[in-house]
């Protein structure tokens, strides 16, 4: 079995387990920070949660859901590399989503992304936006 097939099989199993309607449970013992255990107890007393178990299961499921989205997206990009947005596209989208005033200067974001990509491989959209804001500030005070 090739590596991508093994990963696909793991992804299928992960998603099937995550979305299973099987109500079987397993006893487990986990160590929790005392402050979180006490906060959960208070949340239950105040009527915001049924139990520590409910909160733990919900938190675990929420994190696993987020992981599932990332895994599915990564698989999509593996199969369709041309669909992966560029650093410029991600930076522009992030600026727009965050209502960052730099979103009004797409050319500045493009220049910042080009510089950041060349000088800091592995940088992300936040790095580009910080650099673009610095470029904008430098231009404003010059």
Image (tube, rainbow, N blue to C red):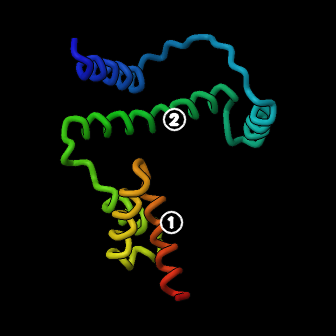
Label 1 Cα crowd, 10 Å radius (few <14 / some 14-19 / many 20+) = some
**Residue at position x 34%, y 19% in the image:** 10
Q: Nearer the viewer, mark 2 or mark 1?
A: 1
Q: Nearer the viewer, residue 137 or 30?
A: 137
Foreground residue, 66 or 80? 80
Q: Is residue 46 left or right of residue 56?
A: right
User: Relative to the observer, which residue lies in front, 120 or 134?
Assistant: 120
Residue at which label 2 appears: 63
In the rendered image, the quadrant that contains the N terminus is top left
The mark tally for this picture is 2
Residue 138, numbered label? none
The residue lying at 39 percent from left, 33 percent from top is 68
Distance CA(mark 2)–CA(mark 1): 28 Å
Q: Position of residue 91 (x, y in %)?
A: 38, 62
Counting from the top left corner in percent of width and height, residue 44 is at 73, 36
Instruction: Please name the residue shown 43% across and 53% down the image.
Output: 120
Q: Residue at x 36, y 33 (%)?
A: 71
Q: Determine whether 42 is above or below 19 in the image.
A: below
10 Å crowding of disc 2: few (<14), some (14-19), many (20+):
few
**Residue at the spot of label 1:** 130
Q: Quadrant of residue 89?
A: bottom left
Q: Earlier in the sequence, mark 2 or mark 1?
A: 2
Q: Position of residue 108 (x, y in %)?
A: 37, 75
Position of residue 93 measured from the top left corner of the image (x, y, whole percent): 36, 63
Q: Circle 1 — which element?
A: helix
Does 128 sit above or below residue 51?
below
Q: Is residue 116 above or below residue 83?
A: below
Q: Mark 2–mark 1 contact, CB under 8 Å?
A: no
Residue reaching furthest to the front? 119
Q: Secondary structure at mark 2?
A: helix
């Amino acid at each position: 079995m090739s590596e991508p097939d093994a990963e696909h099989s793991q992804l299928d199993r992960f998603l099937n387990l995550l979305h299973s309607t099987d109500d079987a449970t397993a006893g487990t013992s986990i160590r929790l920070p005392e402050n979180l255990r006490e906060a959960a107890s208070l949340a239950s007393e105040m009527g915001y949660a049924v139990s520590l178990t409910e909160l733990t299961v919900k938190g675990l499921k929420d994190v696993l859901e987020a992981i599932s989205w990332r895994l599915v997206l990564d698989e999509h990009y593996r199969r369709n590399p041309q669909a992966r947005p560029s650093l410029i596209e991600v930076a522009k989208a992030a600026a727009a989503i965050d209502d960052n005033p730099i979103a009004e200067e797409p050319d500045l974001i493009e220049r910042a992304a080009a510089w950041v990509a060349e000088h800091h491989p592995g940088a992300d959209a936040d790095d580009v936006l910080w650099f673009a804001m610095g470029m904008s500030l430098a231009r404003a005070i010059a």
